[in-house]
Amino acid sequence: MPVHYDAVIIGAGHNGLTCAAYLAKAGLTVRLLERRPVVGGAAVTEEFHPGFRNSTASYTVSLLNPKVIRDLRLERHGLRIIERPFSNFLPLADGGSFSLWPGAEAAHAEVARFSARDAARLGDYFQTMERVAALLRELALQTPPRLAGGWGDLFDGLRLGSQLRKLPLASRRDALDLFTKSAGELLDWWFESEPLKAALGFDSMVGNFAGPYSPGSAYGLLHHAFGEVNGKRGIWGHALGGMGAITQAMLAEAAAHGAEATTGVTVAQVRIRGGEAGGASRAGGASRAYGVTLADGTQIDARAVVANVNPKLLYGKLVAPEHLDREFRNRIERWKCASGTLRMNVALSELPDFSSKPGTHAQPHHGAGIIMAPSLAYMEQAWSDARALGWARAPIIEMLIPSTVDASLAPAGAHVASLFCQHFNPVLPDGRSWDEARDAAADLVIETVNHYAPNFRASVIGRKVLTPLDLEREFGLVGGDIFHGALTLDQLFAARPVLGYGDYRTPVQGLYLCGSGAHPGGGVTGAPGHNAAREILRDFQRR
């Protein structure tokens, strides 16, 4: 016999856990279903080599919403986040280096080594970004309008207009630039120093299968600017114990209010009543979700089914096509998913000895985000290579060494490093498979780091490599897309994932989307889970 719940959630990643915790706190009976053997989705900590643990996929903290941290009592459940010693360290092609410090005075002095003009403009740049990021922080926890017509949309439009009017006209123009222009175009206008532009421009490449001069890439600068750590804005940090510490704390809060989590189970289909082939209607129509069927045939009934999966997986595999009209299915088929990301964890016998800052004893730069991509031109070439050849011949790499601040991750004297690498095309030319290319691509990454730190290759004693294909198979990240869909203007806010269904609801009554494929998009924020839970509870109150 089917088991009954108020809500069943497909996927126990951080947004699914967030949604579950809010629903359970409101008194609903909740069941989380996770395909992997551990909850957390891409935000997990796992042993990848004997004695070495690290964050498997997601690897750094800033975007996790402070309201979610407070509401879910994550600190009470053991979460501790520590700040990076400083933001970014870039070893340069000429043997020098550039460091981007968080403090204004230190940042000004470092930038002035390369350009007095840029140092003078740096403060204005950060203030410009912060003014627009402040609006984004407001919007992140709001439900976008459906834009389906009616008085509700009118009031939503007036509310949004009121928020925009808070910005001075110059900031509204800046916002338009950040949503539509390329990162390269904006940074070239602001600055002349290549290391500074590279340090800032890297954010536009994170999870974005595009070049720094691709239109719309400037949004990546903004998306990564609205975070904070321990109340300090624009700071990045490390969760002690790895990213799994976040999701384990979320699980503890959800379980404290009665939510159940089951791992190692695969949802095969959302069970839906009513609806005619090609003719599903909006909320109020005939189609209604009433549960799920697992791969082993088990049926679970629920008043609400909540999907914490990529929209392509939800609508392409879990919902039968007769419950979605043709135009909607066409839109989902065109949903852009491709990060071009290769993710690797390595176990190290010693710290990297950078030619530009020699020494294998821990130094401040070892605790920074170490970016190996010295210019925007370098990044643009990486993008060009990936399109033509399958992957960048000189890839964009960010390396973090969390064991410098978290001794729990590696044996004494040893270290772990996270390597987040762009650009690796999810679809290789000539029908090649990433299963065949994995080791060659990983070797190239190691050689690239070794170019800047000549002891690196010899220090690697173990590695775990996740290609775009591995990210899709392991975590359901279609096309290796870490954001569940590209963060471009046509896939943001009310249009995420489809215009008319940006409010976490779907064409099927009782079926909701709570993952990164919904507003405000990807990153470990908890915001989609928070917002979806609010809308689900509103619908329950109306019934």
Image (cartoon, rainbow, N blue to C red):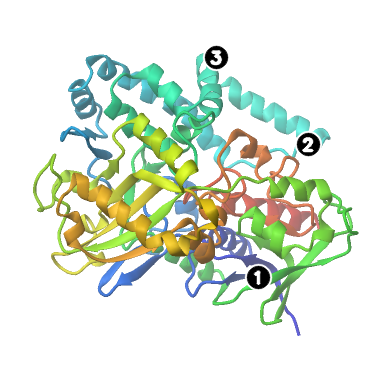
**Disc 3 residue crowd, few under 14, some 14–19, many 20+, Cα 10 Å:** few
Horizontally, is 526 left or right of 517 in the view? left
Q: How far apart are marks 2 and 1 (CA)?
A: 30 Å
Which amino acid lies under the numbered mark 1 shown in the image of this protein? Answer: Thr
Which residue appears at 13% of the width and 50% of the height?
353
Q: In this view, does 242 lie above or below 184?
A: below
Q: Where residue 286 appears, x then y in whole percent?
A: 89, 58
Which residue appears at 38% of the width and 59% of the height?
243
Horizontally, is 450 left or right of 276 in the view? left
Q: Distance between the residues labelled 3 and 2?
A: 27 Å
Q: Place residue 536 in its image quadrant.
A: bottom right
Q: Mark 2 and mark 3 in contact (Cβ < 8 Å)?
A: no
Disc 2: which residue? 152
Which residue appears at 27% of the width and 48% of the height?
448
Disc 3: which residue? 169
Per the image, label 1 sits on a secondary structure element best described as: loop
Horizontally, is 360 left or right of 511 in the view? left
Which amino acid lies under the numbered mark 3 shown in the image of this protein? Answer: Leu
Q: In this view, does 441 lie above or below 8?
A: above
Q: Nearer the viewer, mark 3 or mark 2?
A: 3
Q: Distance between the residues labelled 1 and 3?
A: 47 Å
**Disc 2 residue crowd, few under 14, some 14–19, many 20+, Cα 10 Å:** few
Per the image, label 2 sits on a secondary structure element best described as: helix
Q: Where residue 137 appears, x then y in whole percent?
A: 51, 37
Q: Place residue 358 in its image quadrant.
A: top left
Q: Nearer the viewer, mark 1 or mark 3?
A: 3
Q: Where residue 503 appears, x then y in whole percent?
A: 69, 45
Disc 1: which residue? 29
**Disc 1 residue crowd, few under 14, some 14–19, many 20+, Cα 10 Å:** many
